[in-house]
Image (cartoon, rainbow, N blue to C red):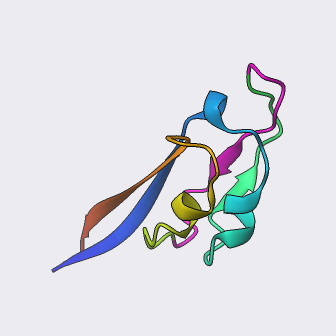
Amino acid sequence: MAKRSGVVRIEANKCKGCGLCVVACPTKSLRLGSSLNRHGYHPAEFLPGTGCTGCGVCYYACPEPAAIAVFYVEDDVA
């Protein structure tokens, strides 16, 4: 049986570093990065292996269109 987990992809140059997705994430799978994007903001970063469920709360919290995409990944569990 496969176990489903989530992956968040963030378009760094569309992110304005507001942190709303970071605060909204129930699994604490996001953080604001230390590097700057081309607009001078610290974009959010996804932290793999932190238990992301793919719930999409970060997507709905983000005010920037197309800055965040959430995907499901099937992990094979033997």
Image quadrant in which the N terminus is located: bottom left
Q: Where does residue 43 sit, x and y in percent of width and height? A: 73, 40
- Near-viewer residue (6 or 68): 68
Q: Is residue 41 magenta?
A: yes
Q: Is residue 22 left or right of residue 47?
A: right
Quarter of image, res 60: bottom right
Give the answer, above or below, for where 51 lies relative to 73.
Answer: below
Secondary structure mostly taken by the magenta-highlighted segment of the chain: loop
- Near-viewer residue (65 or 52): 65
Quarter of image, res 38: top right
Give the answer, above or below, for where 30 lies relative to 2.
Answer: above
The residue under the point 62% across, 55% down is: 62
Give the answer, above or below, for where 29 lies relative to 44.
Answer: below
Q: How many numbered discs, if any?
A: 0
Image quadrant in which the C terminus is located: bottom left
Q: Where does residue 57 sit, x and y in percent of width and height? A: 54, 69
- Near-viewer residue (36 or 19): 19
Give the answer, above or below, for where 30 lies relative to 33.
Answer: below
The residue under the point 28% across, 66% down is: 75
Q: Is residue 65 left or right of residue 17?
A: left
- Near-viewer residue (73 or 38): 38
Q: Is residue 60 left or right of residue 77?
A: right
Farthest top residue? 38
Q: Is residue 70 magenta?
A: no
Q: Where does residue 34 sit, x and y in percent of width and height? A: 83, 39
| Residue range corresponding to the magenta coloring | 38-51
Q: Where does residue 47 sit, x and y in percent of width and height? A: 61, 56
Q: Is residue 5 left or right of residue 29?
A: left
